[in-house]
Amino acid sequence: MNFLVLLFAHLLADYPLQGDFLANMKGKNHIVLATHAGIWTGTVLIAAYFLGYNITYIDVAWMFVVHVVADYMKAKPVGFYKKLDSLKSGLLIDQAIHILQIIVFLFYKNM
């Protein structure tokens, strides 16, 4: 159940809360990318807090940094993203990375 709540928070922050401006500009402007990653990190971790998880600065930093790196690599494209279609396989890998972040977070917090 907790995974589904955090998945919903992820989808909410990565799509409707992002908007067209952030989606179009995050590959061109680091402040816009950081803003999007901050909105995503805040949304997911606020949901986790309301589920009863203790949120630490390490959680915030890890979720934020991984999100920035994943979105930067997809938006530029950098590394293996150069060989991918950004709207198909690139998007799937990006989403897989963010979902894996949630799974790792839940695993770490439930140890």
Image: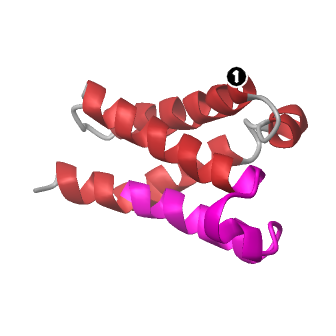
Quadrant of the image occupied by residue 63 = top left
Q: Position of residue 61 (x, y in %)?
A: 37, 32
Q: How busy is the neighbourhood of tag 1: few (under 14 within 10 Å), some, or many (20 plus)?
A: few
* Residue at the spot 35% in from the left edge and 55% down from the top edge: 2
Q: Is residue 58 visible?
A: yes
Does the magenta run of residues contain 101?
yes
Q: Position of residue 76 (x, y in %)?
A: 76, 51
* Residue at the spot 50% in from the left edge and 35% down from the top edge: 41
Q: Residue furthest left?
A: 111
Mark 1 belongs to which amino acid?
Answer: Ile
**Left or right, 61 with reference to 7:** left
Quadrant (top left, top right, bottom left, bottom right) of the C terminus: bottom left
Residue 11 higher or lower than 39, as above or below: below
What secondary structure characterizes most of the magenta part?
helix
Mark 1, residue position: 31
Residue 57 higher or lower than 10, as above or below: above
75 or 41, which lies in front?
75
Instruction: Kindly state the secondary structure of the residue where label 1 is placed.
Output: helix
Does the magenta run of residues contain 85?
yes
Q: Position of residue 108 (x, y in %)?
A: 20, 53
* Residue at the spot 32% in from the left edge and 41% down from the top edge: 51
Quadrant of the image occupied by residue 68 = top right
Q: Which residues are magenta?
A: 74-102
Q: Is residue 50 visible?
A: no
